[in-house]
Each structure stands twice: as C-alpha cells, then as structure tokens.
Image: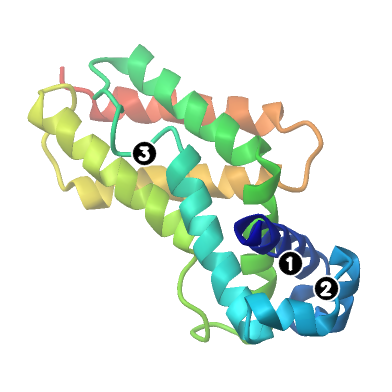
Amino acid sequence: MEQSTKSKILLTALRMFALYGYEGTNLRDLASELGLSKSALYKHYKSKEDIWDSTMEYMKGYFAERSPLKDQGVATPNNEEEFISLLEKVLTFSMKDENLILGRRILAAEMFRAGEGKLPSNPYILEIKSKFELLLQKMMDEGVIKEDDPGFIALLFVSPITDMIRAADHEKDKDIYLEKALEFARCFFERIKKS
C-alpha cells in the first residue's frame, strides 16, 4: 500500500512540476491533488526537495526499465535494417511515452529557470548517449561499422536525434519527427557502415 501511495505521489508531482515548475508547485496543492493532508505527505517524503529528488530518480528508473536499449536482451544490429528497427523502437518509446515527455519538460524548465551550470546535464540525454556508445562499440567490434571513437560517433548521432525528440514533445503528430529522425539515421548509417 505504501509503495502505491509513494508512486501516486511521484506521478502527481511529476505532472505538477511539469505544469508549474519546481517553485510553482507547493506541497499543500500536491497533497490536495492526492486527497491527502500535508502531514500525510510528510509521512512519505520529508520535503519538496525530497519529492523532487525522488521524482528524478523515479524517471531514471522508469527509463531504464522500459527503454528498448536496456542492457539485457539488446541484440547488436548486424545491418542497417536492424539498426533502424532498434532506433524506431527507441524513438517511439521516447517520443510517445507521456511520463518521459513530462520528465523532459520539467528538466528543460528547471534548467532554464536555474540558469546554465546550476543543474547537471539532462540525465535522459546522457543515458541515451551512453547506451548508443556501447551499442556502436559492439557494432565496431563485430565489423558492422567502421572503427572510430564510439563516444564521439554516439555524440554526433544522439545530438540531432534528441533535438528531434524534444521538438516532437510540442507536436500532436509526433510521427513527422519520428520519420525525420529515421531518415537522419539512415543517412548516418550510410556514412559509418563498413564498406
């Protein structure tokens, strides 16, 4: 029961942080939205900052558990078709999952509010870059793509892809950006594939 209440608190906080930002969200309104008293909220979390930190941790776990790039079970793509198929799963998850969209909105708003250098880099972007770096290294090891610095190649690949994901956050028809990202990936793969 407690885990369920804690999850409800985090999901409601996620939505409220996305709508009102960190400063604009107060615990009284959060408790009211949940049908709890403020003191009941304090039984689960000691402060708004604790809820914020727990929400960020929840989002990291949420991404890790559901991502098509999770460590176990991801076969190394052996050709362009397999690479594009995997990317399409990642993009569909990234562009259409409402919790991920809310998480990105919160981070963008808070980074803007706090100013450059006040908050760490977007953990979602760092995580996806890290996952692609490992994937590209495996593809290099198996001779699917040219040998190069996998971190640099991942950065060159992930930066435009994450820009398209963020652009899709503001559109109802996310498939337009999905197709643009897949077209970019096809062109990118042509440049890095082993001849």
Q: Nearer the viewer, residue 96 or 84?
A: 96
According to the picture, the residue beneath numbered tag 1 turns out to be: 13
On the image, the x and y values in percent for residue 151 come to: 23, 51
Q: Nearer the viewer, mark 3 or mark 1?
A: 1
Across and down, in percent, residue 4 comes to: 66, 55
Q: Which mark is residue 30?
A: 2
Q: Residue at x 57, y 34 (%)?
A: 93
Label 3 residue SS: loop
Tag shown at residue 3: none
Left or right of 129? Residue 142 is left
Question: Alpha-carbon distance for marks 2 and 1?
Answer: 7 Å
Whichever of labels 3 and 1 marks the residue nearer the N terminus, that label is 1
x%, y% of residue 135?
25, 36
Q: Which residue is mark 3?
A: 70
Mark 2 is surrounded, within 10 Å at the Cα level, by few (under 14), some (14 to 19) or many (20 or more) other residues, namely: many
Q: Are marks 2 and 1 in contact (CB under 8 Å)?
A: yes
- Residue nearer the viewer, 17 or 183: 17
| Quarter of the N terminus within the rendering | bottom right
Q: Secondary structure at mark 1?
A: helix
* Kind of residue at badge 3: Lys
The amino acid beneath tag 2 is Leu
Residue 3 in view of the camera? yes
Residue beneath the point at 62% across and 84% down:
49
Above or below for 9 versus 50? above
